[in-house]
Image: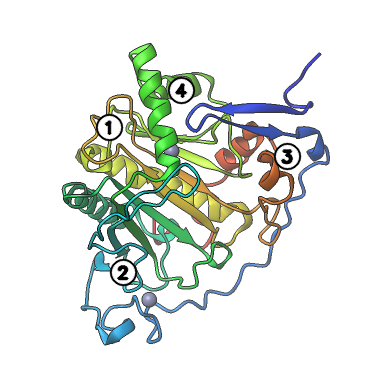
Amino acid sequence: MFDPKEHPHRRYNPLNREWVLVSPHRTKRPWHGQMEASKADDRLAYDPGCYLCPGNSRAGGVANPEYTSTFVFQNDFAALLQNRVAAPPGGDDLFRIEPVSGICRVICFSPRHDLTVAEMSVGEIRPVVDCWADQSAELNAEPGIAYVQIFENRGEMMGCSNPHPHCQIWASSVVPNEVVKEDAAQREYFETHGRALLSDYLHRELASGERIVDVNDQFAALVPYWATWPFEVMIVSRRAVFGIEDLDDAGRDGLAAILKSVTTRYDNLFQISFPYSFGFHQRPARAPGEGWRLHGHFYPPLLRSATVRKFLVGYEMLAMPQRDITAESAAARLRELPEVHYRHTGSRI
Ligand SMILES: [Zn+2]
Ligand SMILES: [Zn+2]
């Protein structure tokens, strides 16, 4: 008898229409999640050498203001430039090229160099949500912008060398690959069923509960059925919200609370500042949005401890992604973790 807890199988991701291989038999051994010794708290609230701290100079000698909440600036090393160059003529099936323009910004979450989302309070995260919403609204309204991507790389393992809490926004004249796939899947599901794909999916997940990590009135956090990364988490709006700027007051509070919950559980898993890439997916600019549901993806690389990481190499580069622990067991572990950050003793909630 086939048992998905025991036997190799593949699961389908209806958002990007790709399969992931699951090999649960490879994790027969009981969990001995080793704890790394927690590093001493040697982070500084202000670092004179940090280009994101208030008052410090960035590339080119521009000084940051003495900001007290969030702070947004144009990326000094932008991957996209605002001036569109005329498209080159021609192009054919084998050699395709298109100009891309856009706007790249950096958002500092806090003047405090030593905080992370996990260690900020819900009340401190809320202005970050407002900033994301304002930026998204502003950039979506810019002529020539097709998509606004908000993302955070957290930790050196993810290639982020500066611990100052910040994220990036890349607003581009094209809809990027991942969003093209999810847009097509959600649009076609909506045309077929008359309901949003992620709305139907979330109803099923909430009814089952086995992959739910946390839930509030506005948002749910879950390990998707088709997760690739060991502790991958998706947060999904429970309301029919297409983009982050469409969130009302309660929605923004709910988003801040679910982000706090997920990032705190992540840090508590191995008692370290947990690395991840996180980003929102939302309706492309000026698209009708029907069928879309605002959501975010956490892609963390860690597997069994603070030092054992997963790489997408070999079979995964050449064939398909693969995971060992099931989404259900990863969700159970995250769900059972305390909601209070391991470095806090109740003084900061
Ligand atoms: Zn800093
Ligand atoms: Zn997505």
**Mark 3 or mark 2, whichever is nearer to me:** 2
Q: Label 4's element?
A: helix
Q: Label 3's element?
A: loop
Pick the front one: 3 or 175: 175
Q: Amino acid at mark 2?
A: Asn
Name the residue located 58 percent from the left edge and 75 percent from the top edge. 40
Q: Which residue is mark 1?
A: 241
Q: CA distance from mark 3 to mark 1?
A: 33 Å
Tell which circle, 3 or 1, labels the residue nearer the N-terminal end. Answer: 1
**Mark 2 or mark 1, whichever is nearer to me:** 2
Q: Which residue is mark 3?
A: 324
Task: Answer with left or right where residue 248 lies relative to residue 192.
Answer: left
Numbered badge on residue 201:
4
Task: Answer with left or right where residue 46 lies relative to residue 153.
Answer: left
Q: In the displayed structure, would residue 191 be above or below residue 308?
A: above
Q: CA distance from mark 2 to mark 1?
A: 29 Å
Give the percent coordinates (x, y) of residue 140: 21, 47
Badge 2: how crowded within 10 Å, few (<14), some, or many (20+)? some
Badge 4: how crowded within 10 Å, few (<14), some, or many (20+)? some
Numbered badge on residue 75:
2
Give the percent coordinates (x, y) of residue 212: 52, 31
Tell which circle, 3 or 4, labels the residue nearer the N-terminal end. Answer: 4
Badge 1: how crowded within 10 Å, few (<14), some, or many (20+)? many
